[in-house]
């Protein structure tokens, strides 16, 4: 086994792909020992925070905590970063209601928040929207609200968009000025490739950055793990003793196009090392065009919430409110008070 390229330690744990030519697709493997690997990951996170000004003195960051490897690492890192910069940090876990899966993550997030001294809030789809995600999926299939293929896609939409909406509402209610999201490098690459040639491509290009403003009056999203890969995050958690949910996997992820795309990307990467980094470089070259397009957008308010959406869209409400409308139809009841109940629940946990 080769020695660590930084300190000469013969016990290496990681081979990191590094670009050696700015315009050349030439990669070399840099071998790192345990100590140098942990330092390299921490340095990458800290550099991302500093270069993109993700955290400044006096900030109040609310971050999503699912109990997975990404959010566990981000929560641990940000909690220690408070020793460098004085800022307030809180975490929120949204229990979608996936039997046999989410309860494990909720408990792991709760334990890590307690050990790191992070104020932690927990809420659920059941309490806010009257249905668990399992029940939503069952009702969508039973009542054939969508075609079969579209129903699978909507499962992830309900989960991701409603969780984000809940976090945005809580952040606004608590006075947080930034929302921390544990989205990594591989997530961004997969999302970009999925949106190639679609109306969402410009938005995805803007999201492939550590700092992202979803709409003019929104709360900025800060993503300290933007330049870390799945492998780096998982290995760091294991070596540093950060507990995270490894099994079971989400029962709805196996047939989702996002996960299938990630599998294909990893296969290509094995054959053509550096493929993901080439995709990233392409996004950076295209980003100025996306910035120009986003600056030309005219935004209008969603009639049902504080979100803003691009003018000229066929839809009259934001995507999350449209999904809530579907839930109202399924239950034949109004969910207009869900935000009030959410804020009341947050206040009771403080």
Image: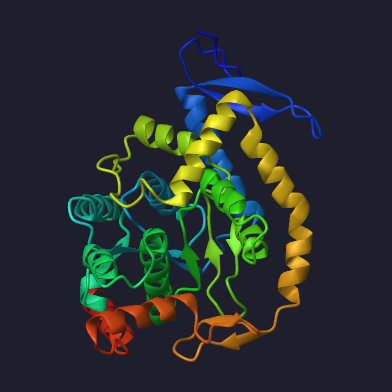
- Furthest residue toward right: 23
Residue at image coords 27%, 64%: 137
Q: Is residue 256 left or right of residue 251?
A: right
Label count reads 0
| Front residue of this view, candidates 330 and 69 | 330
Taking depth in this image into account, of 159 and 147 the one nearest to the observer is 147
Residue at 41%, 65% (x, y): give it.
Answer: 157
- Residue at 52% x, 34% y is 266
193 or 24, which is in the foreground? 193
Tell me the residue at 46%/44% (across/down). 260
341 on left or right of 83 = left
Q: Is residue 247 above or below residue 253?
A: above
Q: In the picture shown, does residue 235 fall above or below 170?
A: above
Q: Is residue 168 visible?
A: yes
What quarter of the picture does the C terminus occupy?
bottom left
Q: Residue 239, image x and y in percent? A: 37, 30
Taking 32 as reference, is 140 left or right? Answer: left
205 relative position to 113: left or right: right
Image quarter of residue 238 = top left
Residue 129 at x, y = what percent?
A: 26, 77
- Residue 124 in sight here: no
144 in relation to 271, above or below: below
In the rendered image, residue 59, in percent from the top left (x then y), is placed at 50, 68
Colouring convention used in this rendered image of the protein: rainbow
Q: Position of residue 170 (x, y in %)?
A: 37, 76
State the image quarter where residue 132 is shown.
bottom left
Q: Is residue 265 above or below residue 167?
A: above
């Amino acid at each position: 086994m080769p020695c660590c390229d930084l300190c000469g330690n013969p016990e290496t744990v990681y081979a990191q792909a590094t670009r050696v030519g700015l315009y050349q697709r030439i990669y070399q493997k840099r071998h790192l020992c345990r100590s140098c690997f942990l330092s390299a990951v921490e340095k990458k996170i800290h550099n991302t925070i500093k270069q993109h000004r993700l955290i400044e003195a006096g900030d109040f960051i609310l971050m999503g905590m699912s109990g997975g490897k990404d959010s566990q690492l981000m929560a641990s890192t940000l909690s220690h970063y408070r020793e460098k910069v004085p800022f307030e940090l809180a975490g929120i876990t949204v229990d979608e209601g996936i039997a046999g899966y989410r309860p494990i993550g909720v408990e792991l997030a709760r334990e890590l928040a307690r050990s790191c001294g992070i104020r932690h809030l927990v809420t659920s789809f059941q309490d806010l929207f009257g249905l668990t995600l399992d029940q939503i999926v069952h009702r969508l299939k039973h009542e054939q609200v969508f075609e079969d293929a579209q129903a699978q896609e909507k499962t992830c939409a309900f989960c991701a968009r409603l969780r984000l909406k809940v976090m945005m509402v809580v952040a606004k209610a608590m006075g947080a000025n930034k929302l921390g999201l544990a989205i990594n490098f591989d997530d961004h690459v997969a999302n970009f490739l999925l949106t190639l040639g679609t109306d969402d491509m410009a938005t995805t290009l803007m999201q492939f950055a550590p700092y992202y403003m979803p709409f003019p009056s929104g709360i900025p999203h800060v993503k300290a793990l933007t330049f870390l890969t799945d492998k780096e995050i998982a290995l760091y958690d294991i070596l540093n003793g950060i507990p995270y949910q490894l099994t079971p996997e989400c029962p709805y992820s196996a047939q989702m196009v996002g996960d299938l795309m990630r599998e294909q990307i990893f296969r290509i990467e094995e054959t053509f090392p550096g493929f993901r980094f080439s995709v990233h470089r392409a996004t950076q070259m295209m980003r100025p065009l996306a910035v120009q397009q986003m600056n030309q957008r005219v935004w209008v308010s969603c009639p049902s919430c504080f979100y803003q959406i691009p003018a000229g869209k066929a839809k009259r409400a934001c995507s999350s409110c449209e999904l809530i409308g579907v839930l109202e139809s399924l239950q034949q009841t109004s969910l207009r008070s869900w935000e009030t109940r959410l804020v009341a629940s947050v206040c009771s946990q403080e």
